[in-house]
Image (cartoon, rainbow, N blue to C red):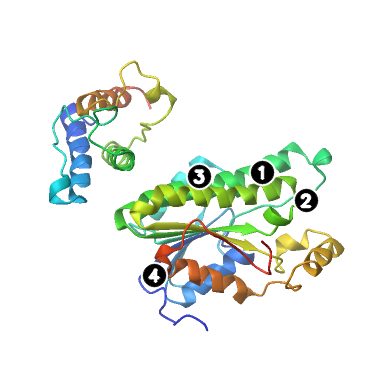
Amino acid sequence: MMPAPSAYEGKFALVTGSRRGIGRLIAEHLLEHGAHVAGFARGEATIEHVNYTHFQVDVSDAVSVQKGFASLKKVSDTVHIVVNNAAVLTSQYAMIMSPAAALAMINTNLFGTFMVSREASKMMRKAKWGRIINIGSMAASLEPIGDSVYAACKAGVSTLANVMARELAPLNVTCNTLGVSGIKTDMLDQLPEDKIAAVIASLPLPRFAEPDDILNVIDFFASERSAYITAQTVFLGGVN
Amino acid sequence: MLDKNAVQDIILQGLKNINDERGPDEQIQIDLDTRLFGTDAVLDSLSLVSVIVDVESAVSEASGRDISLTDDRAMSQTVSPFSDVSTLTDYIVLLLSEAP
């Protein structure tokens, strides 16, 4: 069942990596259901909507994140929902993974998630309400060859959410992780088709994720009724 | 630039914000000697974090300068800036007196 068109009325959401892929999907879903949405991404906006505000922010750069939040505060004095989606992926055997590519993943996928959560939780503190949702990956559980750093980062965002869940619980802020399986995006297109096909075939539910599979869990974590759901990682497709 | 009194007011306001969130029986006494950190501190850890966030943000807004109260320098002061309201005031005034 889809949420009501006004399910996010009055809510201000921040989605990182909102230009494409899962980030764009989630941002458009929230907009469609009444939220005001801010997007953080390195490039220019790809979403045109009266309730969408785009900020060119590189989440891997602490100064850029802080400037982004300074600009965001001119638009809204609080953020209710944060979706930490921005991520980069280089899949390669560790022995030949370039240090620069490894560091880029750590900085964007893990440090960026930390920085955005850090700044957003300061704003949520005053409203005494918040939902922080990290986008994880099945890679954290399946630990596929080539994804040493990516999988470690995605395991890291779950742990990050779990610890912040404890810190922010008194403020009525929940922190959870959605472990996405394979969904056809630009990021997945970087990987060899046969490798992806083999991974998908090994899942208990051996198919790609559909957009609604992702949005269903986002709605669940973000809902008012999920106030007692925190420090949880929900994997799609039967990954555990 | 913010003077000492203005900085003090910002810190006191940060503590009042904590009291606003507490019940009548949990109010903390607020004055220049209010202990912020240490064994006889009146704040729990999350309340101290809240005060720090409020103070950093208010000082930044009022002075146009970003300050950090939790970096290595703050933590390595001989007298902790968080001993009480007076020491925190002095530390912030020191930070603001330095070139940006």
**On residue A91, which mark appears?**
2
Locate residue A47, reporting x and y percent. Answer: 54, 69
Q: Earlier in the sequence, mark 4 or mark 2?
A: 2
Dot placed on the residue nearer the N-terminal end, 1 or 2: 2
Image vertical order of residue A236 relative to residue B24, above or below? below
Q: Chain of mark 4?
A: A
Mark linked to residue A224: 4
Alpha-carbon distance for marks 3 and 4?
31 Å
- Judging depth in this view, the residue of B8 and A155 nearest the camera is A155
Whole-Å distance between the Cαs marked 3 and 1? 15 Å
Q: What's the residue at 41%, 73% (across, down)?
A: A8
- Name the secondary structure under disc 4: helix
Left or right? Give the position of A27 relative to A77.
right
Query: What type is the residue that disc 4 sits on?
Result: Glu
- Residue A204 image point, x, y percent: 74, 70
Which mark is on residue A104? 1
Q: Which residue is mark 3?
A: A64
